[in-house]
Image (cartoon, rainbow, N blue to C red):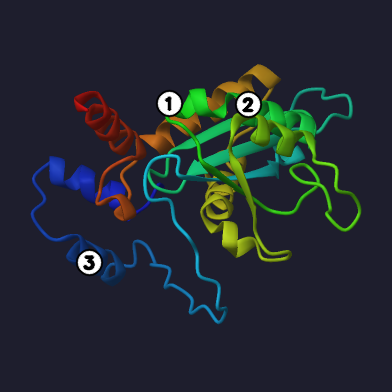
Amino acid sequence: MYGNAEVYVRLLKIGYNRSFGSMCMQIMKKCLKSLNKAKKSYTRYEPITGQYICDKVQIDIKYVPQECIMFSSYGKKYYQITAIDEYSRMRVLEIVEEKSTFETGKFLDELESKFGFPLKTIQVDNGYEFVNDKEVTNKKSYFEETAEKKGYTVKRIRPYSPWQNGKVERSHREDGKILYANNKFYSKDELIKALKQHEDRYNNTAKTCLNFKSPYEIVIENKLLLDLY
């Protein structure tokens, strides 16, 4: 469910001795899972990745599908705000009831304490729930004011270029398939609890980009290094 890296790590624990590449080939041969081939990029976009924990954090917001809300919401819509650290891939998730700079600003105000590391750069799209249109007004949104107050740099991606916020966008697609497509929620508390469990499971799942470690393992290793110095 969470990818080949986690499968490989679990197999190693029970005595599997083939390489990761060999395992992937076996999966392909037996048609247990088709591997997604990376699509060639035809843009000249050069991504700048975080060099250490919380050097650069991508933030986005997604709509919680109404089909999985089984309780009386009285016309309210629910949204999931997601922050993902580019270096460790650790994610922080939260459910809110409106798509606004007030909610994203509150989320940002508490984010550093949830990550446990100082934040530097926040990358977002050009949605009005994050930033104001510079061609319309020079006034900063509540989200931008919060970032300025805390000393963070806000980096906007190019308009109509969601792939530049690719890590958080991909994680949202996985949320849709894993969490929202397979569950029904009968209260807001149940929705929040399920999201928290989903967040914990994601952060404890091994990833190939982390050399078969989980985000939490990377965070713990870096905290230990900080303690040494």
Report helix, strand or loop for mark 3: helix
Q: Nearer the viewer, residue 151 or 111?
A: 151
User: Would you say 36 lies left or right of 138 here?
Assistant: left
Indicate the position of residue 2 as horizontal and vertical percent values: 40, 47
First of labels 1, 2 by sequence position:
2
User: Would you say 36 lies left or right of 160 here?
Assistant: left
| Residue at image coords 26%, 43% | 213
Q: Nearer the viewer, residue 10 or 91?
A: 91
Q: CA distance from mark 3 to mark 1?
A: 40 Å
Indicate the position of residue 89 as horizontal and vertical percent values: 42, 44
The outermost residue toward the right is 136
Report helix, strand or loop for mark 2: helix
Residues marked 1 and 2 touching at CB (< 8 Å): no
| Residue at image coords 59%, 24% | 110
| Residue at image coords 84%, 53% | 133
Kind of residue at badge 1: Gly
Q: Which mark is residue 26?
A: 3
State the image quarter where residue 27 is shown.
bottom left
Q: Which mark is residue 199?
A: none
Q: CA distance from mark 1 to mark 2?
A: 13 Å
Quadrant location, the C terminus: top left
The residue that mark 1 highlights is: 116
Report helix, strand or loop for mark 1: loop
